[in-house]
Image: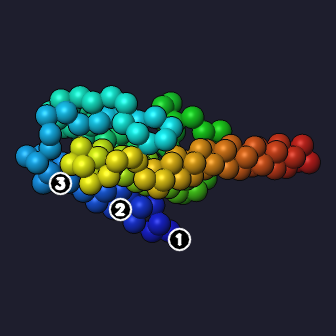
Amino acid sequence: MKKLPFYLKIVSFVLLILIWDYIFMNYRNLPLKVPVYFDWDGKPNLYVPRMMIWFFAGVATFVYLLIFYLTKNINSPLLKMPENSRDDSKNAERIVSIFHLIIMLLLTFITYESIAIALEKNEVLSPVTSYIIVVLFLGVIAMMIYSYVISKRTSSQNATN
């Protein structure tokens, strides 16, 4: 359990490499326009020049580096966590690393799906992308509940002392 954040960071990095590699391997086969925006049904709504797919990879890299920085600096003002959660730095690092992995999974699936739709392998986004978004939101809600429970526990311990 101590090494879990390390392994999660490794998997997140591998996903980032997969994003760049998948774009690199398929770029020449892409049509001049690729989908980047999808409606709730997963159908593409907005197409942009294929050169913009590199911008998406750049955004994924920026997000990766930002969250990697936050896992190293739990006390950063960019990270909105309750103070009691930050007190246990290993637990806070584990939570941020899990979100890091989920976000990188989401970006990887969106990249794959966008290229697959552009290459006409798929017509719409697969439901996996929607499930990952739901897991991400549920994770945020779970973290808020967990932080609330910790804050109540800490305040009740301070009241008895």
**In percent of the image, x 14 and y 44: which residue is there?**
30
Q: Which residue is mark 2?
A: 11
- C-alpha gap between disc 3 and disc 2: 15 Å
Residue 21, disc: 3
Residue 143's x, y, as percent?
Answer: 65, 47
| Residue type, mark 1 in image | Met
- Give the total number of marks visible in the rendering: 3
- C-alpha gap between disc 3 and disc 1: 30 Å
Residue 79's x, y, as percent?
Answer: 51, 36
Task: Specify which label sits upstream in the sequence, 3 or 2.
Answer: 2
Displayed quadrant of residue 152: top right
**In percent of the image, x 41 and y 36: which residue is there?**
38
**In percent of the image, x 89 and y 43: which residue is there?**
159
Task: Specify which label sits upstream in the sequence, 2 or 1.
Answer: 1
| Residue type, mark 3 in image | Asp
Residue 40 or 51: which is nearer the viewer? Answer: 40
Task: Specify which label sits upstream in the sequence, 3 or 1.
Answer: 1
Question: From where the camera sits, is residue 99 visible?
Answer: no
**In percent of the image, x 36 and y 36: which residue is there?**
44
Q: Between label 3 and label 2, give the one nearer the viewer.
A: 3
Q: Between label 3 and label 1, give the one nearer the viewer.
A: 3
Task: Answer with left or right where residue 119 lies relative to residue 111.
Answer: left
| Residue type, mark 2 in image | Val
Residue 94's x, y, as percent?
Answer: 52, 57
Q: Which residue is mark 1?
A: 1
Question: From where the camera sits, is residue 138 visible?
Answer: yes
